[in-house]
């Protein structure tokens, strides 16, 4: 399954690490466009030059890890499309060009299901998608989540619980599902 990942999923660190960790486990094939990656870098730049440099470094690592993930679409494709927010049309165009199955975004209102269905696409939010993955493939998802938890504890110096970290990362349903399957948190 091919999932085009919007910039608002790639920018938050913990969310990105869990989503891409699940992709590394083979549960889906990630896709993005150069513009989506640039939006991520520009969002990071608002936090300062160090954050932007880190984002650009991570973007370069993605190019190595998934060389076929970058989708480029012809400009004329955007011209025939419509979304409530014209600034999101490039995401839809990339999904169409890449023969994606799904667009993963936190921005549901600007990607109406009926418009996506006309293009053979659907939309998921990362929390709902990852929760379903945790229900059907609990081992790989738990492995990723615990790896991200260990990294967050190491980098922050805080003793996060899995559920609290996932809630802070706007993945509360995933956190609840994983916490219910695991007692106690590591």
Image (cartoon, helix red, strand yellow):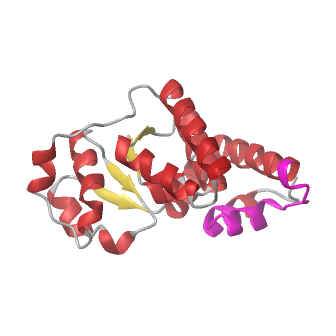
Question: Measuring 42% from the left and 60% from the top, which residue is drawn there?
Answer: 105
Of residues 171 and 8, the one nearer the viewer is 8
Question: Measuring 43% from the left and 25% from the top, which residue is drawn there?
Answer: 67
Q: How would you classify the magenta stretch by its main secondary structure?
A: helix
Q: Confirm whether the magenta stretch covers residue 172.
A: yes
Question: Measuring 75% from the left and 62% from the top, which residue is drawn there?
Answer: 165
Residue 64's spot in the image, x, y percent? 52, 24
Is residue 114 at all visible to an observer of this figure?
A: yes
Q: Is residue 183 left or right of residue 73?
A: right
Instruction: Name the residue furthest front.
Output: 49
Is residue 33 at all visible to an observer of this figure?
A: no
The count of marks equals: 0
Q: Is residue 104 left or right of residue 79?
A: right
Residue 148's spot in the image, x, y percent? 74, 47
Start-end of magenta stretch: 155-177
Question: Measuring 58% from the left and 50% from the top, which residue is drawn there?
Answer: 16
Q: Is residue 113 left or right of residue 152?
A: left
Q: Confirm whether the magenta stretch covers residue 29.
A: no
Residue 133's spot in the image, x, y percent? 55, 51
Of residues 93 and 20, the one nearer the viewer is 93
> From what the image shows, is residue 38 above or below residue 98?
below
Q: Is residue 82 left or right of residue 95?
A: left
Of residues 96 and 7, the one nearer the viewer is 7
Residue 29's spot in the image, x, y percent? 43, 36
* Quadrant of the snapshot with the N terminus: top left
């Amino acid at each position: 399954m091919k999932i085009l990942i919007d910039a608002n999923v790639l920018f938050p660190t913990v969310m990105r690490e869990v989503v891409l960790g699940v992709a590394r486990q083979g549960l889906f094939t990630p896709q993005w466009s150069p513009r989506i990656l640039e939006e991520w870098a520009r969002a990071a730049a608002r936090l300062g030059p160090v954050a932007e440099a880190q984002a650009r470094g991570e973007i370069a690592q993605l190019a190595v890890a998934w060389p076929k993930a970058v989708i480029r679409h012809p400009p004329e494709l955007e011209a025939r499309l419509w979304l409530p927010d014209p600034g999101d049309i490039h995401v839809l165009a990339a999904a169409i060009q890449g023969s994606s199955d799904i667009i993963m975004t936190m921005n549901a209102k600007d990607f109406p299901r009926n418009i996506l269905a006309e293009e053979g696409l659907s939309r998921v939010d990362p929390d709902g998608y990852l929760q379903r993955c945790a229900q059907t493939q609990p081992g790989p998802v738990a492995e990723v989540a615990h790896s991200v938890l260990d990294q967050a504890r190491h980098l922050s110096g805080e003793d996060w619980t899995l559920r609290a970290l996932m809630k802070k990362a706007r993945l509360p349903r995933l956190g609840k599902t994983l916490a219910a399957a695991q007692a106690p948190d590591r």
